[in-house]
Amino acid sequence: MARTILLVDDDEVVLEVLKEALQAEGFATVEAQNGEEGVAGALAHKPDLVISDIVMPEMDGWELCQTLRTLPSTKAIPFVFLTSLDQTPERVLAGRLGADAYLTKPFDLSQLVEKVRELVGRLQGREDVVQGGESSVPAEKMENILVDTIEFLKASVRTGVVSVRSGPSKGLVYLEKGQLKHAVLEGRKGEKALFAMLRRPRSQVSFSEGEFPKLPSNFKLTWDEFMTSLTDKG
C-alpha cells in the first residue's frame, strides 16, 4: 500500500508541484491549504508524513505542528517544515516543536524527495520493531531508528522491552506506560547504556510488549533532557 503524505500550504502552485513529484515516486497525497484543514486531514487520513508551510491563514504551521504533537493519534507522525523562513530562531523553534526536518524555499525537488524517502525508511524500520518483528539496523541508522522507536512507544503509552543485540552483547530498554524505566548494556546503566546502544555497530532491534518484573528506575534525565544531551555530544 502506498504511503500517504499530507501536504499543507496556502500556495496552490506549491501544492501542485509537490503533489505531482511525490505521486510520481509512488506516494499518495492529501492536500490542505491551512493549519485547520491540515489537522482535519491528519485526523481523517492518518498520513505517514506531513509536509507543511509555516506562514498560512487561519492556523499557521507552528500551531499545526504543535496541535498534531499533542493529539494521541497524530503525535508520532513525522513532520517536515517547508518554508521561506530561514533564520536560526525559526529552526530552533521547529526542533522544540518536534519537527523531523526543516527545508527552505525555494527548494530542490530531488532533495525534498530524498528527505521523504529517508523519513519513510525510518518509519518502516520503527514499524518493523513495534509490530513485534526484528529490524537489522546499520550503525549509521541506529540513532534514528532507536530514537524513533522509543518516541513512538512513549507517544502510544506502551509497556515492554526494547532489545538491541549486536554480536554476543545485548542491551535492554524497559518502558512502563510510555516512560523510560530502566536500561542496561554491558555494565552500563540508564542514560549511559542507552547512549552506548545508539552507537552500536549493525544491530538487531526488537520490541517485546507486556509487563516485566519490577525494576528500579535508573534514569536520571527525562527523555527531553537525554535528547538535548545527545545533541550536545554530537
Image (cartoon, rainbow, N blue to C red):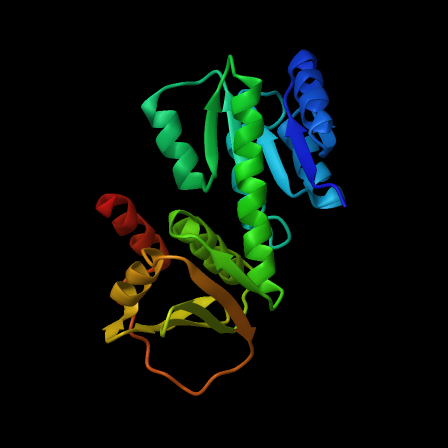
| Residue placed most toward the observer, 87 or 129 | 129
Task: Give the image location of residue 153, x and y in percent.
Answer: 52, 62
Q: Residue 183 location in percent, x, y?
A: 34, 72
Please say if 10 is above or below 187: above
**Image point (42%, 67%), residue name:** 164
Q: Is residue 109 left or right of residue 33?
A: left
One can see residue 33 in this view: no
Front residue of 44 and 186: 186
Q: Hey, which quadrant is residue 87 in on the image?
A: top left
Looking at the image, can residue 182 be seen? yes
Q: Is residue 64 above or below residue 43?
A: above
Task: Give the residue furthest to the front.
Answer: 167
Left or right placement of residue 32 versus residue 147 in this view: right
Q: Quadrant of residue 190?
A: bottom left
User: x%, y% of residue 110?
Assistant: 56, 21
Q: Left or right? Give the position of 92 relative to 126.
A: left
Q: For the point 30% across and 54% down, which residue is it?
A: 225
Indicate the quadrant containing the C terminus: top left, top right, bottom left or bottom right: top left
The structure residue drawn at horizontal position 44% and vertical position 87%, both measured from the top left corner, is: 213
Q: Total marks drawn?
A: 0
Q: Whole-percent x and y of residue 19?
A: 71, 23
